[in-house]
Image: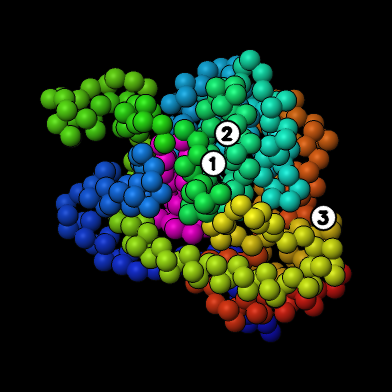
């Protein structure tokens, strides 16, 4: 009987989470924008050097806010990679946009910047690169094309907090960026997110949209004497109890990032020779990128081998998973005209990719067992 169980993800207390949640209750403010939310905002603004950070209930909601802030209208086109989570596209489709899916680069699995300029039309209203696995997109080229066409860039940085491209933090290139604090991310509050705003013109309206379309934030700062409905909006504020949990994790930034770096490097060192001799592709980190150590993935030579490896590990108590399906081939993607062959790299990578267990309490002995088993996988 096999007793081994290695979860793909496991929540962990990293510092003062429980104490701070208790404190949030004792503060008498457990709705949004309480003292812990303010601490989280200040932390993100100071550490990353962004103009404004606003916690949201998810990365999905931060992306929805960005679509509202850009005034996306029915018929507008938004360019994004085909290999991403549904929220990257849904946030814009919700406002009536037509998605234009770009194929990805075979090395980093990020949007292929060489295809970007050709995808721009007179209807294009935004470019939304995703830093897959927290490894930066080629932001120089992307920002250059965007500037030539006066188009805003929204970085979906769900995976990439504290990753860098050419020494600059991911999430600080576009006019806005979205972060995720979902339970699988480096820093979590269970569910959660943030909108990072680099363009100061967007800040005031972002506060309004996040607060149900009211100027409540200005009211609390004493800038107006009553607050009212001034714009479209929704409720995107997380409870201060969740912000308390998140802030405790932020405080452990060094510890969390160091642990994840060690996890990533142990997989890389343990699997490199095996991968080379079995035609398995390991993650590519370009020289100009510092990754966020969000995940460890491998590309197997075929769908069949990938499925067999997932099943083989599962039978032995190890939980590994595949990732995104090509968006253009989903029911929704097909309704926008997507068809097989449109994005061949995504179509291949989606079949071949496996993600290994990766979380803040993964031990090196658990990892050694994963590595040993993979090396014994019958090809
Ligand atoms: C690239 C990307 N964007 C957005 C999201 C949505 O994040 P959330 O669950 O915080 O809404 C995810 C989810 O993991 C993601 O992978």
| Camera sees residue 148 | yes
**Quick check: is 179 in the magenta stretch?**
yes
How far from the left and from the top, in percent, is residue 232?
37, 22
Q: Residues within 10 Å of mark 1 (few under 14, many from 20)?
A: many
The residue lying toward the viewer, choosing from 159 and 138, is 138
Does the beta carbon of the residue at mark 1 sit less than 8 Å from ligand 1?
A: yes
- The residue furthest bottom is 1
Disc 2: which residue: 143
| Up-down relation of residue 100 to residue 87 (above or below) | above
Marks 1 and 3, the one that precedes in the sequence = 1
Distance of label 2 from label 3 (alpha carbons): 35 Å
How far from the left and from the top, in percent, is residue 308?
80, 64
| Camera sees residue 89 | no
Disc 1: which residue: 156
Identify the secondary structure beneath mark 3.
helix
| Up-down relation of residue 107 to residue 130 (above or below) | below
Q: Are marks 1 and 2 in contact (CB under 8 Å)?
A: no
| Image quadrant in which the C terminus is located | bottom right
Disc 3: which residue: 303
Relative placement, left or right, of 237 versus 125 is: left
Task: Give the extent of the magenta segment.
Answer: 176-197
> Which residue occupies 50% across, 36% down?
174
């Amino acid at each position: 009987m096999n007793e081994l169980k290695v979860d793909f993800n496991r929540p962990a207390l990293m510092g003062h989470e429980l104490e701070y949640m208790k404190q949030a209750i004792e503060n008498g403010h457990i709705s949004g924008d309480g003292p812990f939310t303010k601490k989280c905002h200040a932390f993100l603004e100071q550490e990353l050097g962004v103009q404004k950070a606003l916690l949201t209930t998810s990365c999905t909601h931060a992306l929805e806010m960005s679509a509202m802030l850009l005034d996306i209208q029915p018929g507008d086109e938004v360019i994004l990679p085909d290999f991403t989570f549904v929220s990257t596209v849904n946030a814009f489709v919700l406002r009536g946009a037509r998605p234009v899916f770009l194929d990805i680069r075979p090395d980093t699995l990020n949007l292929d910047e060489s295809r970007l300029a050709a995808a721009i039309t007179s209807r294009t209203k935004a470019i939304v690169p995703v830093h897959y696995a927290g490894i930066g997109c080629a932001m120089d080229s992307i920002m250059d094309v965007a500037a030539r066409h006066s188009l805003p860039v929204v970085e979906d940085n769900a995976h990439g907090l504290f990753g860098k491209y050419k020494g600059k933090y991911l999430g600080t290139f576009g006019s806005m960026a979205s972060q995720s604090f979902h339970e699988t991310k480096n820093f979590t509050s269970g569910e959660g997110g943030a909108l990072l705003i680099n363009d100061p013109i967007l800040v005031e309206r972002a506060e309004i949209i996040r607060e149900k379309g009211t100027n409540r934030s200005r009211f609390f700062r004493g800038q107006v004497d009553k607050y009212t409905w001034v714009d479209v909006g929704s409720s995107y504020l997380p409870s201060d109890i969740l912000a308390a949990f998140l802030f405790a994790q932020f405080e452990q930034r060094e510890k969390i990032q160091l642990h994840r770096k060690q996890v990533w490097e142990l997989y890389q060192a343990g699997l490199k020779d095996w991968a080379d001799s079995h035609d398995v592709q390991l993650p590519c980190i370009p020289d100009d990128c510092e990754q966020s150590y969000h995940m460890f993935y491998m590309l197997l030579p075929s769908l069949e081998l990938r499925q067999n490896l997932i099943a083989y590990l599962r039978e032995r108590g190890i939980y590994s998973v595949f990732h995104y399906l090509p968006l253009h081939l989903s029911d929704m993607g097909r309704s926008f005209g997507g068809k097989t062959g449109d994005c061949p790299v995504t179509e291949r990578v989606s079949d071949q990719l496996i993600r290994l267990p990766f979380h803040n309490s993964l031990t090196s002995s658990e990892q050694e067992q994963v590595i040993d088993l993979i090396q014994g996988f019958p090809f």
